[in-house]
Amino acid sequence: MTKTEEKHKKFLNLNLRTKTLLIIGIAFLILFSVFVSNYLIDHTAVLTSNFYNINQPPSFEHWFGTDWMGRDMFMRTLLGLGISIGVGAFASIISTIIAILLGVFSSVNTIVDEAVTAVIDLFGSIPHILLIILVSLAFGGGYYGVVMAVGLTHWTPLARVLRAEIKKINTSEYIKLSTEFGKSKMWIAKKHIFPLIISQIIVGVILMFPHAIMHEASISFLGFGLPAHEPAIGIILSESMKYLSMGYWWLAFYPGLALLFLVLLFDLIGENVHKLLDPQSAQE
Amino acid sequence: MYLNANNISYAYKKNKPILKNLSISIPDNKVIGLMGDSGSGKSTLCKVISGYIKNYTGTVTLDNNLIETKDFYPIQLIFQHPEKTMNPKWKMHKVLSESWNPPQELMDTFGLKDNWLGRWPNELSGGELQRFSILRALNPKTKFIIADEISTMLDAVTQVQIWDALLDYCKQNKIGILAVSHDKELLEVIADDILLFNEINKL
Ligand SMILES: Nc1ncnc2c1ncn2[C@@H]1O[C@H](COP(=O)(O)OP(=O)(O)OP(=O)(O)O)[C@@H](O)[C@H]1O
Ligand SMILES: [Mg+2]
């Protein structure tokens, strides 16, 4: 490789890294501002009915139009997205903790490992929506029920990945060698295993968000989720079903699109963080 | 000091014994060469002696004392493939210092270049990595070295350089060596005695 080529390559690499960081930054900023806007919006003012302008199509005054009670759909959507992010965050935290515990637990011995695998397979084999509804009902439904249900059902993929990864690391020769050097189990877990799985955990957490958000919206839409007075996207969509036949398309179109956009943003962040943490590109 | 392996038997799968009533003795001032057919169980024996395989029958002793397993294991195995014995996300200085920090002269005699220390394992060749794994095994607490085909990936000149350095260090520090190799000429040069695996393994 000539010198200029080398320089060129370096420049491109730097560019890719900066680009990735930029994408992550922008996506994160959007999510953050949606979330923060929820605290700045006056909930009662936004959600009280205003019968002077009901069912108005999108305009400059009401970007997403208004509904049958004259509420501004943009504000309702924003609040809905805020709830989605909240549920997603909480669910990701619970699910990640469960996944890590199971992954670490499975490395104790083969019997425990088989038990953990069985539990993962069991939870993985029940249809997801059904499982969420069942768990939600078990927790008494409502806001609490949904959050717990979504949180308690999204750990299977990450748990599976962590179990496999920890197993692979534990049977590797450099771990055995580390014991030969007289290192303790704690030392090995801290210095060898944890740094090797942390990137998987981070990516796993981010990719859990879109799933949790979609599932919460789905079961709210089906009527098993959040109570009807919450401004959740799933509720908005199921309510607007009644009005779609009257031609009020904006009631479902914009909130649905916004939800899709939110989910795609998380996917985008996950993908780019993965790129950033991937050993191949991380070592450059 | 003597390393004694007495009546070692081992099987990966039941009914398919690899090692049977095998005994071997290595003094700390000698290099014992070991030759044998491929797949006969030499590497398995190396792993038993250096504590990688635990559920064997028989005993491995240093001067008739069983070896404490929680501390630094005084019998260090050097593998044929060094890359598997290194954490892929650790730079070489960390890989080396996990065992100990060797003095500069020693690093020089093994031909270790300073700038290698800042690289990742996948940025060095097999031969370069092997110098690290040898040096790593030469911790002051090491009493015996089990060298399982450690120089097969090296060219003739490097092979001589590395074996010279290793033999020199071991002679000075009273470290005994068990050298496994298919290379008869190499063993004839470096070893004080050569054992044939099929003769000591009583299958
Ligand atoms: N982890 C394992 N599980 C099951 N069988 C194994 C395992 N490792 C090795 N074996 C088998 O044990 C036998 C002895 O293997 P070993 O690696 O000790 O041979 P070797 O004498 O070192 O051969 P080579 O000269 O090719 O290195 C082989 O038949 C091999 O297939
Ligand atoms: Mg072998």
Image (cartoon, grey):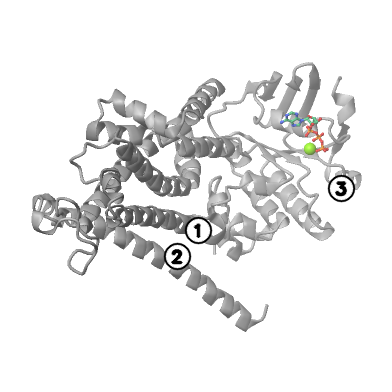
Queried on whether the Cβ of the residue with tag 1 lies below 8 angstroms from ligand 1, the answer reads no
The image position of residue B81, as x and y in percent, is 72, 46
Q: At 35% from the left edge and 30% from the top edge, which residue is drawn?
A: A133
Mark 3 secondary-structure assignment: helix
Give residue B162's quadrant in the image.
bottom right
Mark 2 touching mark 1, by CB under 8 A? yes
> Is A231 placed left or right of A277 in the picture?
left
Mark 2 secondary-structure assignment: helix
Q: Chain of mark 2?
A: A
Local packing at callout 3 (Cα closer than 10 Å; few below 14, some 14-19, many 20+) is some
Q: Chain of mark 3?
A: B
Labelled disc at residue B186: 3
The image position of residue B168, as x and y in percent, is 73, 50
Q: Chain of mark 1?
A: A
Give residue A93's quadrant in the image.
top left
For residue A70, say whether it is visible.
yes
The residue pinned by badge 1 equals: A275
Tell which circle, 2 or 1, labels the residue nearer the N-terminal end: 2
Q: Amino acid at mark 1?
A: Lys
Please tell me if label 1 and label 3 are on a single chain: no
